[in-house]
Image: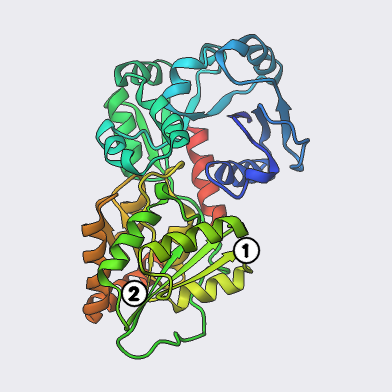
Amino acid sequence: MRIAFCVYGFTADVTKLQPWLTILHVANYLSEHGWDVHILTDADTGNFLDGINIHVIDSLRATNKEQVWRMLNVIGAECCVVLTTPLNLVSSGWYQYLPKRLVAFLSYPFYTNSELLRALPHLTLEDIKTYYRHALIPRVVWAGNLRRYFKSVVAQSPRTANRVADAASAEMMRYAIPAGIDLDVWKPCDLKPELPVGNTRYLYLGWTKAIRGFDVLVRAFRDIAGPDTELLVLARGATDEELAMTQHRLAAAGLDKSVRFIGGWMSQEDLRSEISQASVVVLPFVLVPSELPVSVMECIACGTPVIGTDIDGLPDAIGKAGMVVRSGSVGSLSEAMLLVHKDREALARMRAACVESRNNMMSWRQVSAEWMQILQE
């Protein structure tokens, strides 16, 4: 079968991130199984995938629909997977040129207005431009185009798949296929935590930005900080300037001496060790750019519970292997963090749930096999 993926911004540099990571694995798997795979994108970094045809055009916007149409006509795919957001559902202008077997891969979480309003105090001007442009599209408009052109929708959580498909049509086929994970890499570490009995180590991973809930975390930890609690921040990829700014923010909150801070990048093995030695990982996202941060699954696979927020695919991914709190809420987060510290039986139950959750996680080959089955229907 000949298939085309219509993917904005597809380069080698972004294939470690969602949704491009999923497309990379699925495309490679299909190619291995004899499919004629084509990727249509607007980013030119050369053909970096063996056995897969990458076609570069100027843009996937409606203003370039004639070039898109010509390239799709040359490809002649029997099936197309399109990265879908509210904005491109009404602005692409070239869906009518695609084959009837059209699958929407939800690369944006399709936030409700109430979720965006709750997040507003934590957003920069650039964040507002990124997320609120989608909110400007009336639901009835994007849902109508989804119903008109697409056969089915695929998301990484049942919550998102059902939310979007229900908006378009109760009869629309919807599939929830989670991200895959390398279980040979992400597993509990043999090292035991170097914590005194009764102490709790909270671990935060990623950029120290307000949209990721870092400011909420600082305020929540300030409420519960004591001699038997510790917060470790792994600000992966942070520059020296960003580290200095974050240290200044911690000092202003009176936490400069009670928070341990590591910037830059560390090896995968060292990262796994830090995750395994934490009591709990705290990822209080206010909004996420893609539906499910893979870091949530990686932490749970290492046997460490996660405190996350009630947005997108996070509740489905966390389940009983952690706690879900209201996004942007300092009080809700501090209560959850304090519970982990005070109730060791609850923490033990969450750790046991991590093992069960890990047993149900799928490898990338299993994920890709599910994709192939859907695309054949």
Please state the horizontal and vertical placement of residue 85, each as a whole percent of the image: 44, 28
- Find numbered disc 1 in the image and state the secondary structure of the residue it sits on: loop
Q: Quadrant of residue 277?
A: bottom left
Farthest residue toward the top? 66
Q: Is residue 365 above or below residue 223?
A: above
Q: Quadrant of residue 270?
A: bottom right
- In this view of the protein, can residue 60 be seen by the observer? yes
Mark 1 vs mark 2: which is more N-terminal? 1
Kindly identify which residue carries mark 2.
Answer: 351
For the point 37% across and 53% down, which residue is it? 213
- Find numbered disc 2 in the image and state the secondary structure of the residue it sits on: helix
Kindly identify which residue carries mark 1.
Answer: 265
Q: Are marks 1 and 2 in contact (CB under 8 Å)?
A: no
Nearer to the camera, 376 or 140: 140
Nearer to the camera, 129 or 165: 129
Q: Is residue 63 above or below residue 85?
A: above
Q: Is residue 143 above or below residue 297?
A: above
Please state the horizontal and vertical placement of residue 20, each as a whole percent of the image: 58, 41
Nearer to the camera, 135 or 317: 135
For the point 42% across and 75% down, which residue is it? 257
Q: Quadrant of residue 231?
A: bottom left
Please state the horizontal and vertical placement of residue 166, each as a whole percent of the image: 28, 29
**Along the horizontal axis of the image, is 208 left or right of 283?**
right
- In this view of the protein, can residue 361 be seen by the observer? no
Name the amino acid type tagged 1.
Answer: Trp
